[in-house]
Image (cartoon, grey):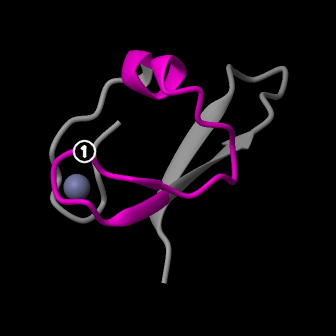
Amino acid sequence: MDCPSCEEHIGWEWVEEEAIEPNEVFECPECEESLRYLIDEGTYLGPQHKTVEVVD
Ligand SMILES: [Zn+2]
């Protein structure tokens, strides 16, 4: 994913290593912005889609 604040790439491997769950607030390792991600469950049309957003 790309951080929506600083646009640096953050690997999903990092998210998994840090054991960050969906809807859980975490800090971008690059800019320390508070972020969270959501998972839209996949439909028969395709795989899961993850959305990353800045937490206000
Ligand atoms: Zn960032």
Quadrant location, the N terminus: top left
Please provide percent x and percent y for residue 42. Answer: 78, 28
Please provide percent x and percent y for residue 22. Answer: 69, 43
Q: Is residue 11 left or right of residue 54?
A: left
Q: In this view, does 1 lie to the left or right of 30?
A: right
Please provide percent x and percent y for residue 49. Answer: 62, 35
Residue pushed farthest front? 18
Picture mark count: 1
The answer to whether residue 11 is above or below residue 36 is: above
Instruction: Give the quarter of the image for residue 12.
Output: top left
The answer to whether residue 28 is above or below residue 49 is: below
Which residues make up the magenta segment? 13-35
Ligand 1: quadrant of the figure:
bottom left
Q: Mark 1 points at which residue?
A: 29
Q: Which sits in the foreground, 19 or 10? A: 19
Cβ of mark 1 under 8 Å from ligand 1: the answer is yes
* Residue 21 among those drawn in magenta: yes
Majority secondary structure in the magenta region: loop
The secondary element bearing badge 1 is classed as: loop
* Residue 15 among those drawn in magenta: yes
The residue positioned 17% from the left and 59% from the top of the image is: 31
The residue positioned 30% from the left and 60% from the top of the image is: 4
The answer to whether residue 4 is above or below residue 3 is: below
Q: Is residue 33 left or right of residue 35?
A: left
The residue positioned 16% from the left and 60% from the top of the image is: 6
Instruction: Give the quarter of the image for residue 40.
Output: top right
Q: Which amino acid does label 1 sit on?
A: Pro
Q: How crowded is mark 1: few (under 14 residues within 10 Å), some or many (20 or more)?
A: few
Q: Which sits in the foreground, 36 or 29? A: 29
